[in-house]
Image (tube, helix red, strand yellow):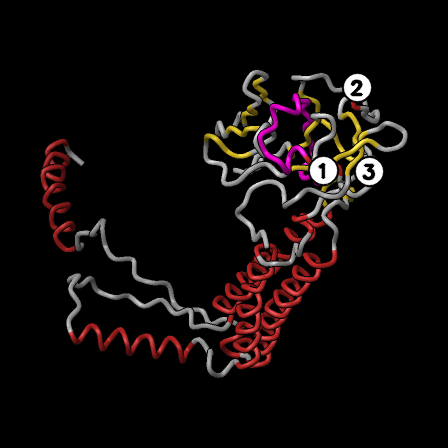
Amino acid sequence: MSSHEISEAEDKLPEARGAESAVRPAEDPFADPGLPPHEHRKQDIDELAARRSERTVALLFTVSMLATIAFIAAYVALPVDRYIYVFPIGHISALNFALGLTLGIALFTIGAGAVHWARTLMSDEEIADERHPIEASPEVKSKVLEEFATGAKESGFGRRKLARNTLFGALALVPLSGIVLLRDLGPLPGTKLRHTKWAKGKRLMNYNTMQPLRPEDIAVGSLTFAMPEGMSEEQHDFQTEIAKAALMLVRLQPENIKDKRELDWSHEGIVAFSKICTHVGCPINLYEQQTHHVLCPCHQSTFDLSDGGRVIFGPAGHALPQLRIKANDQGYLEAMGDFSEPVGPAYWERG
């Protein structure tokens, strides 16, 4: 081929390329890929598989019901002071562990059952819906209601009675967990909040030395804290009981005691009052020697120990309960009964 023929062929090449591009259609880089072909699940074509899925859903809901019943049983039966060892957490409250485990299982199995129901038994076809204005026209409303009815029918909610009924059972029992927890807000404590460890004949023990107190151990103008004989910090309910039985002793000159009953319940000017503030239950530990006033450090409620422990300032609602005391034959101070009224805050029934 001569150089002239090669030159003519090169001149015709762009024309050939242009003709080819004109024949080939242009590709759209943003073409709608469409949806992949729908693949039926096994449950869609095999009723036995669908029944197995329904039984699985029912089993999960039944486990939820049993877990809720176990939650209630654990709350009633397990003591609050029992501890167990759980690896790798360590020693924890048996009650808290049981409540958390059973309630977690109850809620998880309801969710797992609902998810399994949706993935295996409800319709899974993807439907493309064109965008439409936000406002709902009557046609849209009717369409939504129609789709809802169709979805309800396709979900098998009416046909899958076993799964539906166990779902109802699980949902009905789960709220009982919260209702049972409300029992402590009721009258179950009975009268135990109205009584303490003080009783007739119990000696007054110095809270710091754990030794019985004699009248000569308490000087005029001093503040001494005491607790009932027989209590010790090793007892499992010590903190609960001392929160009601904590006592403070002050020795006054008998002529300085204004309240007659307070004088009658004292011994040689030694008066015994509850240490627990009648506002919200804080311990009282500030004493003004000249005025015979005691001050609660939490909200500054002030009580006059020379006048029946009455409130002279602050939010406390009533006077401090007094404990009647005397000296026994051995010369030790002892109680002549319990406090004159319930100790601590007045927000529970005091009848």
Instruction: Identify the residue under disc 2.
Output: 216
The residue under the point 69% across, 37% down is 323
Who comes first in sequence, dot 2 or dot 1? Answer: 2
In the displayed structure, does residue 50 sit left or right of residue 331?
left
- Separation of disc 3 and disc 2 at Cα? 18 Å
Say which residue appears at 16% left-offset and 51% top-offset.
Answer: 20
Residue 42: percent from left, percent from top: 53, 73
Residue 55: which quarter of the image? bottom right
Residue 170 lies in what quarter of the image?
bottom right
Q: Position of residue 7 (x, y in %)?
A: 11, 34
Q: Residues within 10 Å of mark 1 (few under 14, many from 20)?
A: many
Specify the label residue 324 is tagged with. 1
Amino acid type assigned to the residue bearing label 1 in the image:
Arg
Q: Which of labels 3 and 2 is toward the front?
A: 2
Q: Is residue 247 magenta?
A: yes
Q: Which mark is residue 202?
A: 3
Please name which of the two marks, 3 or 1, marks the residue nearer to the observer. Answer: 1
For residue 112: magenta? no
Q: Residues within 10 Å of mark 2 (few under 14, many from 20)?
A: few
- Tell me the residue at 57%/64% (across/down): 176
For the residue marked with disc 2, what is the amino acid?
Glu
| Residue 70, position as x, y percentages in the image | 69, 62
* SS assignment at label 2: helix
Q: Is residue 191 above or below residue 250?
A: below
Are dots 2 and 1 in contact, CB under 8 Å? no
Q: CA distance from mark 2 to mark 1?
A: 18 Å
How far apart are labels 3 and 1 at the CA level?
11 Å
Placement of the N terminus among the 4 image quadrants: top left
